[in-house]
Each structure stands twice: as C-alpha cells, then as structure tokens.
Image (tube, rainbow, N blue to C red):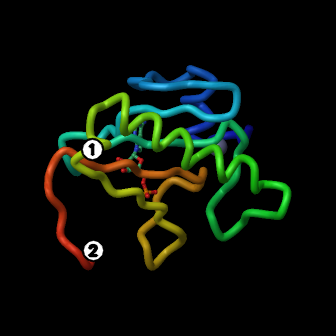
Amino acid sequence: MAENCIFCKIIKKEIRSQIVYEDEDTIAFHDINPQAPVHILVIPKKHIPSLAEVHENDKDILGKLLLTASKVAKKLAISEDGYRVVVNTNRDAQQTVFHIHVHVIGGRPMSWPPG
Ligand code: AMP
Ligand code: ZN
C-alpha cells in the first residue's frame, strides 16, 4: 500500500468505487470516466507503480491481472463480441494513475491503431 495512491484507497475502501470482482490478489471496478459502454479497471492489491517497474517476483500477480480481466469480460458479457485490454505505461502512453492497472474496454467496435 502506498500513501496518497488513489487506487490503494479504493482497495482499502477509503474511496468508493463500483466493484465488479474481487479476490485475494486483484480487484476490478468501473472506470469513473468510461471510454466505452464497458470500461473496467483491474488492479493488483499490491502497489506496483507501472508496467515499467515490475520484477521477476511479480510474474504471478501479472498473470492474475489478465486472468481477472478475462473473468470480468465474461461476467459483463463482452467476451464473445470482444474487448480491448490496455496498460498505459508512463508519459507517452498518458498513464495518469501510478498504480498498475489493466483497462478492459468493450461494448462497441473499436478502431486500430489507437491514438
Ligand atoms: P491511465 O490514464 O491509464 O493511468 O488510467 C487511469 C484511469 O483511472 C482513468 O481512465 C480514470 O478515469 C480512472 N480513474 C481515476 N480515478 C478513478 C476513481 N476514483 N475511480 C475509478 N476510476 C478512476
Ligand atoms: Zn497504489
């Protein structure tokens, strides 16, 4: 847990969020500013600032993030039509919250390449 980290506060339930899934290692909740009909953030309960700062011993939790993303997509009924998983990392990707998170975005067709 990190002081002043908004996602750590969501994990501790100090800030309210619309949680759609939680287990011992991960939590998933609705993005406050959705970019599509379904826009969920999946985060680890461990505070890791970004994908640029992961270590060998984070490999289980990194795997769990994608597993949770897949479960959530099924739960919210976007799995069959399809969805996008995005991990914005550092400045060029416009990462704004420095607690690693996986965006799960779906419910509409998307274009490629992303902006
Ligand atoms: P990123 O730009 O990849 O760092 O994404 C951060 C995401 O967190 C943005 O899509 C924000 O809308 C979202 N966000 C920020 N604060 C909250 C919050 N309190 N509850 C839910 N989502 C949030
Ligand atoms: Zn945090």
Up the image or down, 69 lies above or below 22; here it is below
Query: Residue at point 43% right, 73% down?
Result: 93
Q: Which residue is mark 2?
A: 114
User: Looking at the image, which is closer to me, 84 or 53?
Assistant: 84
Earlier sequence position, callout 1 versus callout 2: 1
Query: Residue at point 59% right, 31% down?
Result: 9
Q: Is residue 55 left or right of residue 94?
A: right
The label shown at residue 93 is none
Residue 64: x and y in percent read 64, 44
Q: Pointer 2: residues within 10 angstroms few (<14), some, or many (20+)?
A: few
**Where's the C terminus, which quadrant?**
bottom left
User: Looking at the image, which is closer to me, 73 or 96?
Assistant: 73
Asked if disc 2 is less than 8 Å from ligand 1, the answer is no
**Where's the N terminus, which quadrant?**
top right
User: Looking at the image, which is closer to me, 70 or 91?
Assistant: 70
Q: Which residue is mark 1?
A: 80
Residue 34: x and y in percent read 25, 44
Q: Is residue 98 left or right of residue 55?
A: left
Q: Amino acid at mark 2?
A: Pro
